Image (cartoon, helix red, strand yellow):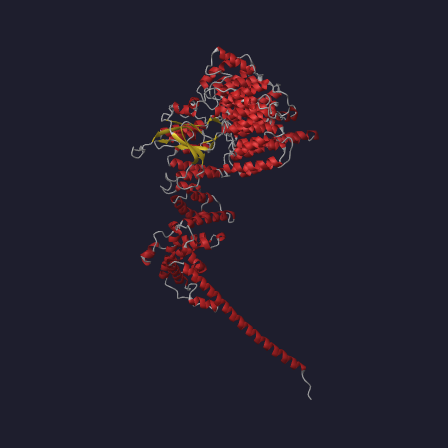
Amino acid sequence: MAPVDRKDESKEAVDITMEATSNEKKDDTKSNNNNNIKKKQKALSSNKDLEDDNAAAMSEEDKALKERLETCVTTLTGKKPIGSDDEKEAAVREEVMDPVPAAEPLIQLKALQMITTELRSATSSMTSVPKPLKFLRPYYDDLVQFGKGLEGSSPVDVLLQARMSDVLSVLSMTFGDSEKRESLSYKLNAFKTYESLPHDEIKTIVPKELMYENDGDDNLGCWGHEYVRSLAGEIGAEYNHRITVDGADPDDDAPFSDLLRMVDSIVPFHITHNAEAEAVDLLLEVQRLKKLLDLPAGSIDEGNYKRICLYLIKAADFMADPDDLHEVLNVAYHVFISQGQYFDAMRIALRMNFDEEELKKLLNDCPDELLKKQMCFLLGRHRVNLDYSEEDETLNDIISNVQLSEQFLSLARDLDVMEAKTPEDIYKSHLAETGGFVRNSHRRDGGSSHVDSARANLASTFVNAFVNAGFGHDKLMTDGEGSDNADNNNNNAEWLYKNKDHGMLSAAASLGSILLWNVEEGLTQIDKFLYSSEDYVKAGAALAVGVLSSGVRNDADPALALLQEHVEDGTSSSHVMKCAAITGLGIAYAGAERADVTDLLVPIIEKSETGGNEKNDMLETALACLALGMIHIGSADDVAATVILQRLMESSEAELSHSHARLIFVGLGLLFMGKLDQCDAMLEAISTIGQQEADDDDDNANADTDVKTKNWSKYGSIVLESCAYARSGNVLKVQKMLHECTEHLTEDAENQAAAVIGISLIAMGESVGVDMTVRAFDHLLHYCELPIKRAVPLALALLYLSNPEFSVIDTLSRLSHDPDEELSQNAIMGLGFISAGTNNSRVAGLLRQLSEFYSKDAGHIFCVRIAQALLHMGKGLLTINPIHSDRMLTSYPALGSIFSILHLCLDMKTSLLDKTHYLLYYLTCAMSPRMLITVDEEGSTWKPVTVRVGQAVETVGQAGKPKTITGFQTHTTPVLLGVKERAELGTEEVLSVASVLEGIVILKENPDYEPESEEQK
């Protein structure tokens, strides 16, 4: 028997196995294919059921629209619509359909026109998703491919390409990739294609019914507001991309010519469709705001200029760059001028710190005499030193506030508050004697068992001076209406001599506050004290002359005439007389920028080479720097800045350690108030203070001295920078100030205290910034050291001047009971500042409780009395808030005076609680009547009308005519206005010349007014 070949047998077995496996795979594949087909059929069946349900839900009109659009897409792309029987069968068998034969270009153009018509009619008002967009969504990719494949150079082909790009641009608004800015890309391509289109030739080829009137640049608006808005957003993104990535120069128009061409079409569209805010936003995005002034005639009219300018003014608050800020305000200024709104243009001019010649030019350009007079009232309220006209003294008198005293007294008579109040009327001691808890003297270091009577009388002097400010009489110094009788003289002398030394100075100076703004009568009463044998009384009278003239300019210039001899170089006047005269000049000429007054103060500031009393010399120098800063506040005057800086450079450590040396830095900061980056060079110079001494002396024994010098250098830098960015809301500067507070210091932390006040100075006046700042202060109170905590009450007060918010009152009330002496004193002073001139009953009750609580602490009770004096200042008719004209303008003399007092409060023991309490009279620079008086066309006679007074409502960016006040009450003028209140006329019989009802407002008859007939009534 033959042997078996095992190899062949094995091979045969393998072949049989592989064949069997292959057959099994084929069977499985066939089975899987059948299953997939069944699944797809089932899915299509399910989709068909869903489509049937959707179709059943659609109206006949929607079905017809869907079919029309699908037919148009088929005509364009050559593909059958999704959901047709052929398409479903091809999907099941995974085959590609045969394309529909390509249509003629004119037929495609007709189909595209139908799609365009449906899209334009649906997207003009996009309150919901437009149905054409919904129905075209499945075909977006096909349309994109069709658009990319369009070729040909014939006019019809070019027109088809351009219109296809338009349609794709609209569809990309919802279906495209926003990051790639596809919508903008298609639109830019459409613009280029339209440019290459032979317009004359196309009219002869394309039927008239297929042509649009607005093919090209002007067809943006016909696609609807939402499309234009979306396109504007992509333009801004593309503009930034070309600058940051492509390195294009933003000042050159060439790299952005295509974008700017679209901007020129979009902006007029927004303006004419009540979307002024969006137009301004787009121009700000592309840094071409001046194009707003080049719009076609009639684009900006009396119906929309207010909304445009209001948005520009509010947008200016968020401009970090000084050049951008200037451009925004400058555009608003020219829009107001173009509409003949010279009063509003004057408000912008004051916001931009126009110089004297520019203000005169604006007044000269105004054709309306009434409007010019109203502008002068605004200049007077803003404390602008402007000698406008040599011919018309009436306008000069208005700017000089000559009528201010008369109008204020008329207001007081109308409100029946002329009767003089005594300090006891304010203290209400009979209400405080309740036997309640009294703070024990042992709880305070150095607390005395009784308050010194001289200190109590000094406090009463300030209470009397502030409460009766501007009324011309009181019961301590003038004794009623009379001023020249013998009994009155005896009364004056009696009260004067109830004070000691510097207390006598403040008592005599109180006459200036009582007779505030009434220069002629005031000088008569003050004159006799100038010849007193008592040096302090003479000094007080000199200060009274300056206080009396605060905010008022007189032809005779009495303040300079009477005080000049006491501050001239080589004068024999005593130290106290010199200090009082310097302070008087600073108060009288705050904001005046008088060169002759500067020449008097400069020699005092320059370092004395004589061997006099160095301590006295330094006080005179500090007061002179403060006065010079007040006189040239916000001017960045080179002479004044150089003199003060030179004095700082030459000062020794002993001089910088003087209790009032901080006033030198404050004076320097005031010069640059609101000047933004103009302070940069001065900041560099201040940072070098003390470096020379540190370099020359390496002795370790002087290490502490070097630290103090560096801290004062930091203090000066922070004061200067915070003043320069006052009310700017600059977030980066606020962060820098907060960074200063991160270091935990328990002493020599003047720079940190200044930073806290600086935060408020930068953020004040803007509601969102104020709220964020208050939240930041809460963190500082929780986590920071005492030097920072002590400054927080003062910073809160700066944010809410004459604006007693409940939450802030509650915070300050809590801090007023703090165990730390300085913190509680600052909190008490803060209560006075936030309630100044409001007669707020809640604060009055808190201060009465504090007067009982601190009855045995001389320093605290003095602070309580000053706070009470501020609370009832002017018997409730005055305010110290520097922001006015509907919270748009800031009076720098007012802000500077408050800022100076707050910095003195950082070291109250050696200033206000010591011998320089008379510096409190700087507050008269901030005092202003919070009144609304309506006068006739002559500007002097009252014309009472009904007005509605309510809480101001922010209307920026709102279309139409929204309500500007809420919760209003109707009054008859004159009325008092709070910080957050706004007034509007309650009758149509008269028209206001001013757009803002504050201060003195001129009324004129309404020529279109028709009184109601008896039947209508």
Q: Nearer the viewer, residue 662 or 994?
A: 994
**Residue at the limit of the structure toward the front, as seen here:** 435
Frontmost residue, 586 versus 898: 898
Q: Position of residue 573 (x, y in %)?
A: 56, 16
Quadrant of image for the N terminus? bottom right
- Left or right of 740? Residue 186 is left
- Establish if 741 lies above or below 142: above
Give the tally of numbered discs: 0
Q: Residue 90, relative to residue 562: is it above or below?
A: below
In the image, farthest residue toward the bottom: 1
| Residue 730, position as x, y percentages in the image | 53, 37
Residue closer to the observer: 856 or 766: 856
Is residue 370 placed above or below 579 in the rendered structure? below
Question: Is residue 701 among the parts visible in the rendering?
Answer: yes
Position in image of residue 697 (x %, y %): 67, 30
- The residue lying furthest to the right in this view is 700
Looking at the rendering, in which quadrant would you find the C terminus?
top left
Q: Does the image show residue 601?
A: no
Residue 405 sits in quarter: top left
- 246, 797: nearer the viewer: 797
Please state if 341 lies on the left or on the right of 833 as rendered: left
